Each structure stands twice: as C-alpha cells, then as structure tokens.
Image: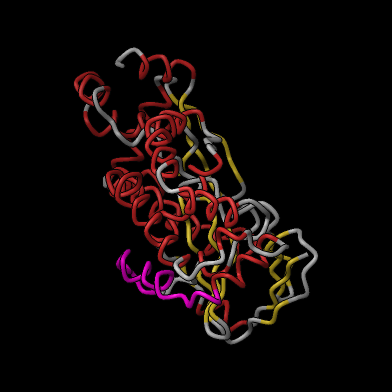
Amino acid sequence: MGLWRIDADTLASSRFVVSALAEATATLMALATASAPHPGQRAWLDHHLPAYRERLATDPVTALLVTAQLGSHWIPDYLTPTPSGEADPDFYDELAQIRDTPAEVAQADLVVALGRPLPDQLNRRDLPERSADLLDWVWTHAVLPSWKSRRQVLEADVVARTRQLSRGGWAAALDDIRPGTRWLGGGRLQINAYDYPPREISGAQLLLVPVTPRQGWASWAEPHRYALVYPCSGVLAGLNLSPAAGALARLLGAGRAAVLLRLDTPKSTTQLVALTGQGLGSVGRHLKVLLEARLIERRRAGRSVLYYRTSTGDVLVQAQD
C-alpha cells in the first residue's frame, strides 16, 4: 500500500486549503473521462462536454497529451503541483508552476505515467505550455462561472471535516476522505492501495485539498509539503437555486427554502451553515420545522448527524421546476 509516516509535529501543522488549480485539474479529469457520478452533475457535464470535445478536436496534439496524462493510474507529477498552503492562492500563480515546468521534466513525468516511451507526436518542448493552456481554458469556461458556488461547497466540507477532527481525531477526519485512504494509527497514513514503499514525511506540512468532482490524487514538494486532494462530501449540483428558490421562498420562507434545496444530498448542520450563510440557530430552527413537516429526515454518520430530503421533500422541490 502507499503509506506515509507522519510525526506529531506534522499532524499539528496540517491544514485544509482550497486550491483553484486543483479544482480546475479535477474538472479536467471529469471532462476527460465524461464522468458524472452524481445524477445532479449530469446536467453540468452535458452542458460543458461538447465545448471541451470541440476544443480538443481543433488541437490533436493536446488531445493526445490529455490521453497520455490521464490514461493510466499514475498522473504525471508536473500536472499536479503541490499547493503552496496559502489561504487563497491566485489561480494564475498556481498555474505558473505548470507553465514553467522544464520540457525535459514534463516528458520524463509522462514516460513514468505511461510506462513506455512517448509517442513521436509528444516529443516536443511545449508540453507544459499546452497543459497550462488547456487548464486555463477549463478554468475560464467550466469552473470560473460557478466558482462562487464551488467555493461554498469546498468551504463547507472543510468546516465539517475540521469538526470531525476536533471530535474524533485524525481517524474520523481521514478514514473516508478518498478511496483507499485510512488513518492506521501509530503515525501511519495509508493514501492508496498501491504497493509503493513507505514515504517518511515527518517534519513536513500536510495539506488536505477538497475538490468538487469525484477525483483525487497525492502530490508532494519534497521535503517541505505533501498534499492529499480528495473529493469533498458536498455536491456542486443544486447550488443554482433558481427558479425553484423563488417559488419555495414564497411558500416556506427564504431561509427554510435555502436549507431544503441544499439537502438533495446528506449534509450536516455545520455544512448547511457554511453553504447558506445563515446562523447556527436559524438553520437549527429550519431543520426542526422541516423534520416536523416530514420534508427531511436525519441519520447519524459516525459522530455527525446528516440531514437529507425525503421523497415528499423531493416532490415539493421538483414541483417548482
């Protein structure tokens, strides 16, 4: 298994961060695989996939580069630079790390990812620039228009996991963070199920980076920073609350409607507070009324209580579409 050995100081300095570049890279992966694991994300994918495919159809070299980058279980290191750990890094500052990659480094990373020599069409020195240009396109066309909503989902996930961490320790915060990742105790973090030698990261900073697509990877800038990019627990779909929001707001009140609309997937009270911008007391009162009206249900997941819409709640929301 892929194993990281971590000391107490590394755990103490670990933090959750949001990365616009990681979000754009995960979105590129979703477009490249035409993957929408949640039904609500299908509409987003159907909207953006034709333009993405047209973009690659006009640039066969970049299309082949995407296949080389994402066509195996190993993502080339240069495509996933480790975030700096800054609170709110600029997308283009992050993207510069890819654009400035030496050509020979990018080619070597791609050979490792492919497990074989590069095809002749990719024996060229502009691969980092092509990778950066495509990510810039994905950011501009597929991420930036919904970045405000995406940030809300990502920040809600950070709030929820920080709460898990404070209540149940690293096992509670990390065990379900991404497939194959588990906190094993004794300073051992399993990051995937592959048979790689253990990696000693004691003394470094561990960054945990949520993204909204169902993608994830590990990266490192040895010896100082290591990162786990993971799919967040919220779902991007459903955060555009028009036109249903107006109709439901008149029926239930704006605050209560906002809570109901965001419960298409299970969410904790803490997540709802972050997503709606309402206070904890207000969200609690709305949940109580919605429970009494049998528009939502709740269930316990570990130390958290998650709320979600019932079939009646779904019917009420769908009737407004």
Vertical placement of 251 versus 2: above or below? Answer: above
Magenta extent: 86-105
- Which part of the image, by quadrant, shows the N terminus? bottom right
Residue drawn at 57 percent across, 69 percent down: 77
Rendered location of residue 38, percent (x, y): 52, 33
| Residue 117 in the image: above or below residue 309 | below
In front here: 172 or 99?
99
Q: Is 180 placed left or right of 155 in the picture?
A: right
Give the image location of residue 174, x and y in percent.
Answer: 61, 60
What's the residue at 44%, 60% (across, down)? Answer: 131
Instruction: Judge whether 297 appears above or below 11 on screen.
Output: above
Q: Nearer the viewer, residue 138 or 252?
A: 138
Query: Residue at the spot x=50%, y=48% of the render?
Result: 63
Q: How many numbered tags mark residues here? A: 0
What residue do we see at 66% from left, 62% from top?
113
Residue 263's image quarter? top left
Residue 91 falls within the magenta-colored stretch: yes
Residue 133 quadrant: bottom left
Q: Confirm whether the magenta stretch covers residue 22.
A: no
Percent x, y for residue 35? 54, 38
* Lateral position of residue 287 relative to residue 173, left or right: left
Q: Considering depth in this image, is 320 or 2 the residue closer to the camera?
A: 2
Q: Quadrant of the C terminus?
A: top left
Task: In the rendered view, tell whether residue 2 sits above or below residue 61.
Answer: below
Outermost front residue:
120
Left or right side of 9 for 159: left
| Front one among 7 and 278 | 7
Image quarter of residue 181:
bottom right
